[in-house]
Image (cartoon, coloured by chain):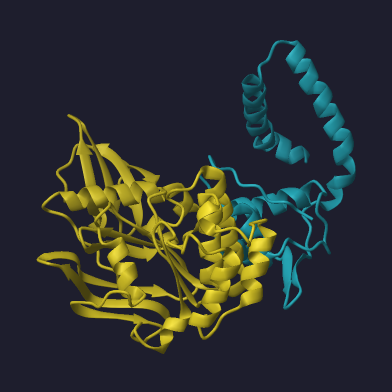
Amino acid sequence: MIEFVLDGRSKGATYTQLVLQVKQALRVGLAQPGDQLPKVRDVAQTLAINPNTVLKAYRVLEIEGLAEGRPGVGTFLVGTLAGPSLANQAELREQLVAWLHKAQVAGLAPEDITALIDTTVRATLDSPAVKHIL
Amino acid sequence: MTGIALETGALGKRYGRTWALRGCTLHLPAGQIAGLVGPNGAGKSTLLHLAVGLLRPDEGKVRIFGQDPRTAVLTDIGFVAQETPLYRDFTATELITLGGKLNQRWDVELARSRLAQLGIPADRPVGKLSSGQRAQVALALALAKRPRLLLLDEPAAALDPLARREFLQTLMGAVGDTGATVLLSSHLMADLERVCDYLIVLQTGHVQLAGAVDDLLAEHRTLVGPRTASGALPGGAQVIRASHTDRQSTLLARIARPIENPAWAQHEVTLEDLVLAYLAAADTPTAPTCMGK
């Protein structure tokens, strides 16, 4: 089951943080359709946040077709974001780890690495040429 | 739960010749967790004492779920007063028994199991417990009434950060269980940002701002742009607080619709920005007043 955490420095609303964490877990396969989300009162108590905030996050997930409330039982994941790419993720991740080690050896600080990745992602994935290839 | 948990109309309370609260009009929808903020002496405790029927209004009215608090509706109200006063020589068990004698509706098991879960010794005089544990005992007693409206007067003010977090955890868990409406006075904005979905700002006995937190945050922006006389903003924006340099004005404004003038950079505000702006604005003579609707 997902365990939520709150980023106190994040500017995003609390409920969006919860929604994003569920989506992230679905993307990387940590959570799967059929999994139950933690009970609203438990999340509210653990994080010391308003239960209405948790309800709101779950409602957003329901509207997006990712979760489903079953009265008297709880909220369950029904959709997935992993898609067919999940099978390839392990290998890609290994390559990325290898690349990160290379970058470190080459003397890049974590900030340099993030900046390089960010700009490259923007330049590569957003450019029309690549979209054409894909 | 729907409806209005707490409603006041032109409510006023006077101590001698000084009005502690005056012209206080607001409503708190049921099911919300509301933060009550304002400087010391703003009337927060007076408002809470009027709401729980411990004080009688000098003018105006206060209604709890549509009824005068000095009636049967009192059984629906739980109250934790400032500094959580308890009979210090009594043990938690004795206080729970006492509460059972004094209240029509009283869930002994709920109170006992809450304290047991928290590992609070039920057989020691509460005066010998830590302040965090004492606050938890006071909260457990208030919750034993199974109130529909829970009023808390700076319950966490004297607690260390860990005890404060534990107190809020217990409170939020209990609200998750019962759906009770909560009105919580506090100076701790970080706590309020975490738990509140409704905000009431009091200043010198008046309601300065009241509303659902999401709405308030959506309606206000910090605007940074060319030096401008206050009041000369586009789009019917109302300036709450302004500061100026030679060339630049920084305004916290209530905006009716998005400002599309590119000369103005817009930033979202935090709850703390909002509270500070309204409190500072109220100190100036030309204060804009936003009564609760």
Task: Reply above or below: A39 against A117.
Answer: below
> Is residue A1 in view from this perspective?
yes
Q: Is residue B243 above or below residue B53?
A: above
* Residue nearest the viewer, comparing A21 with B258: A21
Taking the image as shown, residue A3 lies to the left or right of residue B5, namely right
Quarter of image, res B177: bottom right
Question: Percent from the top left, x then y, of residue B49?
Answer: 32, 70
**In the figure, is residue B219 to the left or right of B94?**
left
Taking the image as shown, residue B156 lies to the left or right of residue A39, namely left
Please name whichever residue, A96 or B7, is drawn nearer the observer in this view of the structure.
B7
**Residue furthest top as drawn:** A106
Does residue B260 appear in the picture of this structure? no
Q: Which chain is yellow?
A: B
Quarter occupied by residue B226 = top left
* Residue B71 left/right relative to B206: right
Question: Which x, y percent locates residue A37?
Answer: 74, 61
Image coordinates for residue A98, horizontal then vertical, percent: 84, 22
Q: In the depicted view, which residue is nearer to us: B262 or B137?
A: B137
Which chain: cyan? A
* Number of numbered labels in the structure image: 0
Q: Residue at x 29, y 76 (%)?
A: B8
State the image coordinates of residue B147 (x, y, percent, origin top left). Answer: 51, 77
Q: Nearer the viewer, residue B102 or B3?
A: B102
